[in-house]
Image (cartoon, rainbow, N blue to C red):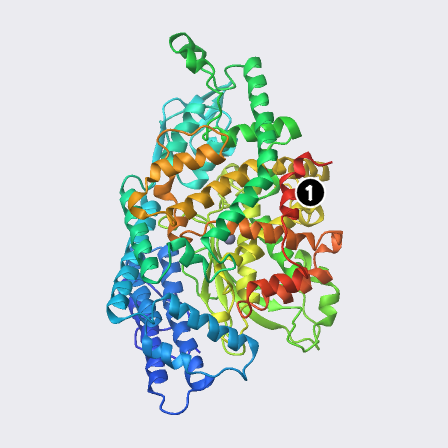
Amino acid sequence: MAVMEQTASVVDTLHIWNGLQDAEQAKAWVEAHLESSRREIAALLAVAAARTVENTLAAYDRACWHLRMAGSQGGVMFMVHPVAAVRDAVQALQQVVSAEGTALSLNREVYRALSALDVRGEDAATQYYLERTLLGYRLSGVDKDDATRERIRALADRSTELSMRFSRTVQDDVRTVEVADANELAGLPEDYLARHGVKDRSGKLVADAPVVLTTDPPEMSPVMSYAASPRLRRSMYLAYNGRGYPANKQVLLDLLAVREEMAGLLGFRSWADLATVDQMMGSAANMREFLNEVEAAARATAAREFAELEAFVRERESLNPEAAGANPEAAGANPEAAGAALPLTLSDARYWEEQFRRARYDFDSQSVRPYFPYAQVEAGILATAGRLFQVRFVPVPDAPVWAEGVKAFDVVDAGSSQGTGTNAGLSASPLRAFGRDDNSVVGRDDKPEVVGRIYLDMHPREGKSKWFSECSLVGGVLGRQMPEASLVCNFPEPKKDSEHPENDDAGLMQYSDVVTYFHEFGHLMHEVLGGRQRWAGQSGIATEGDFVEVPSQMLEEFFEDYELVAGFARHYETGEPLPRETFARMVKASAHGRALSTLTQVMYATYSLETHDRPAGELDLDRLLREGYDRFSRYSFVEGNRMYAAFTHLVGYTSNYYTYLYDKVMALEFFAEFAGEASEMLGGETAMRYRRAVLEPGGSKPARELVQAFLGREVSMDALQRWIGKEFSA
Ligand SMILES: [Zn+2]
């Protein structure tokens, strides 16, 4: 698969980042893969003999593999490469790669060649691959006349350009909030204050210089959760939700118009219908029905949650008007300001939910941060994933990486399903792979098999994307190419200061960060364990788009298991494990607000659906946003909120934001299969059954079959409803 003509400037055909220092090298690497892709297609078209899977589908699959290499590694370098000129170069190349992909998806000769294949005697995966590929071709308009196809090609290029511009604008638009009076930072954690040069002098906060906060998540997020000042929260909320505005408003409208025209040319009523026809969902109408079902499942509990919250704020306010956010000085001049805490607005939501959790469950999410120093969490997650999926992660210190601090690990299979049976000893004692003897030697009869390589790029860096994501780097092919993938995250970075040990920073994580880590790791394992298919096009996370969040969301649920978390959650100073009782309160507290946040997700999903289902020319993005908040959110809208201008999911997911909810429903149903196994939850029979039924097939079967194989039944709303109401149960 990696057979590619070596050009002078390409040293490592599998890894663009190996030795990469300038734009020219990046260009040469990407172009070499594009060239290989073109060569495969030329060979496919030149076949004069009868068409066979080998001379046609195999060549097509290799061509796609090269295209994906060019696209995915270029895309990742845009997110992570430390050299700005390289980032600019790969960004420009993204357009070229995308155009090339579009050209292939509109290539009638290739479509004809594939259509001529007779796969009746082939395995089910091959039949499914061809069926999906041909459907993809028809969705690209390959069977349309020349003029239509030319128009579709132009629209696709335009769509790529607009999407890139939208994302780039958001990524580059870091806004700042100036804090005039350091006392406005009251409520924020000590290490946050220290990082900004703020000191506590007998109850008064003082700073040597004016404090300027940015909208980067590590700076923004604590303000929204902990800052007692409603004014500061509001400024931060508006700054964060103003990113990309005004430029992106028109970019988004243009993009929606392009998509609408494209859907029309392909015979669909709307983009939302087009974008769901090859998904589990099937249509925009099904999506609306699904969102209604979720809304119905959450509404009553949401009303109950919000009523409790309002009562709590009212009580707080009457006890201590200043702490509740009212401004007594302004009260005389402006009576409305006196009751500033009510009604609750969207910029108050996270703060008050946090206050409520602290009071109701006596749980302060800050209090558990000392148990989650970054390094311990990383080791714990590797150990947990190792036990669950029966693999080991072996550091590869000399593997080429793109920036200092990025770590590489080989994934070694300890529970191979490839039929050798030689790993039985290890499978029977999953604890061996857990933390303490991570590098234990596999017995001499065993043949440990490296099944993939992962990279962890986990901390913020200048010029790096602000997101938390999992990225495929090399697509796997059974027996030919091992999959490689990376996490690109922005967790706090541990720092040692040998001269001033008092300045050491353990990189303490919020527990929600830890959950995010579990989530992204779920994608990573799907990529690697699903990475052994006959066809590259079915490898890893190649299922229907609206199934891809199931394995990641399911892994999040494991965070509610005490034994598992206590395995790595130890105090960074004392080494004491996270107390069981604190953990129990944390789990209860985290259940609070689920109904409200589920409705928020329904709101985003509805926004994503409606922007892609209504005529683009009639869209009023602001009014639609307002309507969404009014219908689904119990919090008051904050005037000036333009979150759509930074809603990058509209670029990537288009109309299909619903997938988060859809997949949550399935993830919870899946996780329920593990319940009852208690401490056997990891390394137990269910885990291996899950790995085989859901992860290992990658995209070689319809997702419905994976669900059916693991659950043995259809999906219901039962697990979701139990999950939403957990705070009120028992
Ligand atoms: Zn995800």
Residue assigned mark 1: 577
The picture places residue 644, in percent across and down from the top left corner, at: 37, 42
Picture coordinates of residue 404, whole percent (x, y)? 43, 56
What's the residue type where badge 1 is placed?
Answer: Pro
Q: Is mark 1 on a helix, strand or loop?
A: loop
Whole-percent x, y for residue 290 in the image: 53, 49
**Can see residue 439?**
no
Residue 576: x percent and y percent?
69, 41
User: In the depicted view, which residue is nearer to us: 393 or 683?
Assistant: 683
Horizontally, residue 256 falls left or right of residue 575, namely left
In the picture, residue 97 is in which quadrant?
bottom left
Residue 244 or residue 517, whichever sits in front: 244
Q: Can residue 80 be seen in this view?
A: yes
Screen quadrant of the C terminus: top right
Between 341 and 72, which is closer to the camera in this rendering? 341
The furthest residue to the top: 332
Query: In the displayed structure, would residue 9 be above or below residue 353?
Result: below
Q: Is residue 205 depicted above or below 68 in this figure?
A: above
Quadrant occupied by the N terminus: bottom left
Q: In this view, does 445 lie to the left or right of 503?
A: right
Residues packed near mark 1 inside 10 Å, few (<14), some (14 to 19) or many (20 plus): some
Residue 21 versus residue 359: which sits nearer the camera? Answer: 359
Quadrant in which residue 682 is drawn: bottom right
